[in-house]
Image (spheres, grey):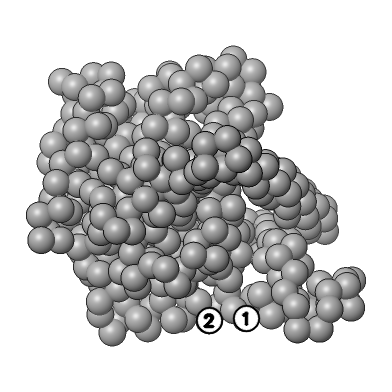
């Protein structure tokens, strides 16, 4: 039965993407089929094989060690702030972002990350039917973040037509940056974080290829990566500050969103006898069902999915942690994969703002197709969850 539901879910996701396609005649079927097959193979490899277990364990161990290193710096500055035995979300989950941001800066400075991103991007361009720039951007977004990635290609931003700019922004919203992967791993199982990273990469290409198909001419298929000329210690200072800004911004958003949701839930409960999240749960329940989640769990799962869309993934992961005992292990895995992306309303402002800071005209273009961008990125999350439902 789960295979029939998964097939139905896959067809629904592709149909919803096709419904909003801006050029259906240009859709390339073969690369899409190949990438869907790759997604199934990756999901099976990562979640159902010994090799996948070893790979994910190694990845998780690296981030566990990095979080331990980060803790030494946090304890030096904030030691004793939290009561012994208690867990401070800001100290334990958000502040380690600062240290991981520094590591990314070092790898960027010594040209290790650019080399990896260019190499993988070139290989992906042979599979996805898109240009080198689009493929590089998808990898770079996962490495350096959804706003920072545009700095690396700022020389080309002014020359990009709207359709290529959409694909770049879609990749940035569909993935998550390595700087906060460690934070996710403290909230949901690492194996689902790693699996989502891999699936969303190809899912972003699949949905963009349907919603926004186009052909890149060879003379236009250029990749010019911009690097800032800085001294090593200038770079360190910049990435430390940037990492701290991310931690503070996420913390501020959590304070606002969690308080707002609590207030809205209370008002709805007093007036209608049902919380706002429960109402959203009923709206999103059909999507939860096509992701392979049973009817009896679909409303609660739909509420978490909606929370992620209207707030952010951190708020939704916190809700999932509170409710995880009420879900089956399979449902927990499916929801976890869905949550690992930047597909939410606030990301529209983040991405359009990042592009606008580099090129005002292109930033305005991004703002105009912001809702379509979020629509596509959400379909990517649903697609990844559908794929995972087959192997769980």
The residue that appears at 39% across and 54% down in the rendered structure is 301
Quarter of the image that includes the N terminus? bottom left
Q: Nearer the viewer, residue 138 or 386?
A: 386
Looking at the image, can residue 5 be seen? yes
**Quarter holding residue 135:** top left
Where residue 233 sits in the image (x, y, percent)? 82, 58
**Label annotation for residue 61:** 2
Residue at point 37% right, 50% down?
299
* Residue closer to the observer: 31 or 64: 64
Question: Horizontally, is 74 left or right of 48 in the view?
Answer: right
Q: Residues within 10 Å of mark 2 (few under 14, many from 20)?
A: few
Q: Which type of secondary structure does the marked residue at label 1 adopt?
A: helix
Crowd rating for badge 1 (residues with CA inside 10 Å; few <14, some 14–19, many 20+): few
In this view, 150 is above or below 122: above
- The reply to whether the C-beta atoms of the residues labelled 1 and 2 are less than 8 Å apart is yes
* Image quarter of the C terminus: bottom left
In the rendered image, residue 192, in percent from the top left (x then y), is placed at 40, 67
Residue beneath disc 1: 65
- Among the 4 quarters of the image, the one containing residue 390: bottom left
Q: Could you tell me residue 322's position as x and y percent?
A: 54, 66
Q: Going by the image, does 35 lie left or right of 121?
A: left
Instruction: Measure the alpha-carbon separation of dots 1 and 2.
Output: 6 Å
The residue lying toward the viewer, choosing from 110 and 11, is: 11
């Amino acid at each position: 039965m789960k295979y029939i539901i998964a097939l139905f879910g896959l067809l629904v996701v592709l149909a919803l993407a096709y419904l909003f396609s801006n050029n259906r005649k240009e859709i390339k079927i073969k690369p899409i089929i190949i990438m869907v097959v790759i997604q199934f193979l990756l999901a099976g490899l990562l979640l159902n094989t010994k090799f996948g277990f070893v790979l994910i364990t190694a990845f998780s161990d690296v981030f566990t060690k990095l979080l331990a290193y980060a803790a030494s710096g946090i304890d030096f500055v904030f030691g004793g702030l939290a009561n012994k035995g208690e867990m401070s979300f800001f100290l334990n989950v958000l502040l380690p972002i600062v240290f991981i941001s520094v590591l990314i800066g070092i790898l960027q400075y010594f040209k290790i990350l650019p080399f990896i991103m260019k190499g993988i991007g070139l290989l992906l361009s042979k599979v996805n039917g898109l240009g080198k720039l689009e493929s590089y951007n998808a990898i770079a977004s996962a490495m350096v973040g959804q706003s920072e990635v545009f700095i690396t290609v700022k020389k080309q931003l002014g020359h990009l037509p709207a359709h290529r700019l959409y694909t770049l922004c879609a990749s940035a919203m569909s993935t998550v940056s390595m700087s906060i992967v460690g934070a996710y791993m403290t909230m949901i199982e690492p194996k689902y974080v790693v699996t989502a990273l891999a699936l969303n990469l190809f899912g972003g290409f699949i949905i963009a290829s349907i919603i926004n198909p186009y052909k890149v001419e060879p003379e236009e298929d250029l990749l010019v990566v911009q690097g800032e000329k800085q001294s090593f210690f200038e770079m360190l200072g910049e990435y430390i500050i940037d990492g701290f800004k991310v931690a503070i911004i996420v913390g501020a958003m959590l304070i606002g969103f969690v308080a707002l949701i609590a207030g809205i839930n209370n008002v709805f409960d007093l007036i209608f006898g049902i919380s706002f999240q429960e109402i959203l749960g009923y709206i999103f329940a059909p999507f939860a069902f096509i992701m392979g989640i049973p009817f009896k769990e679909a409303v609660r799962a739909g509420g978490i999915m909606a929370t992620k869309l209207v707030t952010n993934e951190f708020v939704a992961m916190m809700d999932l942690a509170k409710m995880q005992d009420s879900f089956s292990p399979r449902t927990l895995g499916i929801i976890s994969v869905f949550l690992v992306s930047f597909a939410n309303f606030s990301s529209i402002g983040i991405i359009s703002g990042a592009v606008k800071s580099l090129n005002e005209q292109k930033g305005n273009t991004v703002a105009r197709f912001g809702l379509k961008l979020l629509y596509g990125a959400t379909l990517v999350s649903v697609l990844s969850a559908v794929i995972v439902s087959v192997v769980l």
